[in-house]
Amino acid sequence: MRAAVLREYGEPLRIEERDRPTAAPHGVVVEVEACGVCRSDWHAWRGHGEWADDDVPLGQVLGHEPAGRVVEVGDRVTEFAVGDDVAVPFCLGDGSCPRCLSGHGNRCENGYALGFEPAVPGAFAECVAVPHADYNVTHRPESVSARAAAALGCRFMTAFHALAHRAPLGAGDWVAVHGCGGVGLSAVQVASALGARVVAVDIRDDALDAAARMGAAETVNASETDAAAEVQKRVGGAHVSLDALGSAETCRASVESLRSGGTHVQLGLTTDAEAGEVRLPTDYMTRHELSFLGSRGMSPTSYDELFALIDAGEVDPGALVTRELSLDEVPERLAAMDDYGTSGVEVVTEF
């Protein structure tokens, strides 16, 4: 099968022929119909993460936002059959550790990150193998196309988990979203669906226009003003603020956007400019009793909550898709992220 493989950090991914995967006894093989191209793939391609023992090894097949159809089933799998339409999360659990059993499979003690480690080659490929399928894989409703499921496979689910499960978000609260790429625009949709009001912050007018279309009540161009001060001025500070990019500037601006007692949620990963560490105004945070939370992906067991919002018409991950790609275009589109040359969510639909 054809697959996009990381051979050298920062050099174009190579489209190679690889052996088709086989299903583990507890796993399935999915024929990939769509896979999103995410900034986390860009981090992997650039070789970021060494500071957190999280760098992706050379030789890895990237891609972690797949949706498709089951084509092979292990003999211990009970919930899936050949031909089932499915969605696959990037954070995979073993389904048996205490964290998985308590609904926190995104933090599984023995978990895998699809597309980021050799045990689970990724989905920039014609087929992908998924372990512990009964726990990790989810049936995809007819209302959710493969294209839309790929859009929610990492960024949308990450935004949903952050706002629905991690942050103390209430109806009518103000949410500041710093960075309006795929995860930021997802957060705008999700926050609006949960009854919050959104202030979207970015340095690009096209991204802010997209945020307004997704439901943002206010937009702030951080290239023209002090973003945190502007959020404070317009809405009295945010109850919840998200850093959806991962730079030192957006992280600090997010914290300083909060009103007293507010909560910052970190979604974006840093680059080698920050190497995993950001200076923060800790005395200010103490004085105003601000909370700082991290949030990663979403437990595979939470898909039904997200699908219910989609079925009700409250959110539309497919609306974030700005471009469909062939597998051969992936190397060039990853490189375009160097200068933020992509918008919304781009999805591979031709393999």
Image (spheres, helix red, strand yellow):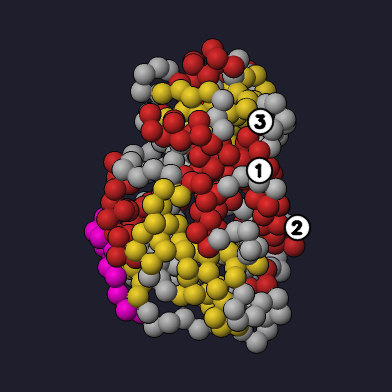
Which quarter of the figure has residue 241? top right
Question: Which residue occupies 56% across, 25% down?
Answer: 217
220, above or below 129, in the image: above
288, above or below 83, in the image: above
- Label pair 3/1, CB-CB below 8 angstroms: no
Question: Which residue occupies 28% across, 51% down?
Answer: 335
User: Is residue 166 or residue 80 the one in the foreground?
Assistant: 80
Which residue of the protein is positioned furthest toward the bottom in this rendering?
75
327, above or below 173, in the image: below
Residue 248 seen in the figure: no
User: Which of labels 3 and 1 is toward the front?
Assistant: 1
- Tell whether 135 sits left or right of 326: right
- Tell whether 43 sits left or right of 320: left
Local crowd at mark 1 within 10 Å, few (<14), some, or many (≥20)? some
**Chain part drawn in magenta:** 6-18
Which residue of the protein is positioned furthest toward the top in this rendering?
233
Question: Which residue occupies 72% across, 30% down?
Answer: 171
- From the image, tell me which residue sits under label 1: 314
Q: Position of residue 66 (x, y in %)?
A: 50, 64
- From the image, tell me which residue sits under label 2: 102
Give the amino acid at mark 3. Ala
Question: Which residue occupies 49% across, 75% down?
Answer: 31
- From the image, tell me which residue sits under label 3: 196
Asked if residue 37 is among those painted magenta in the image, a careful observer would answer: no
The secondary element bearing badge 3 is classed as: loop
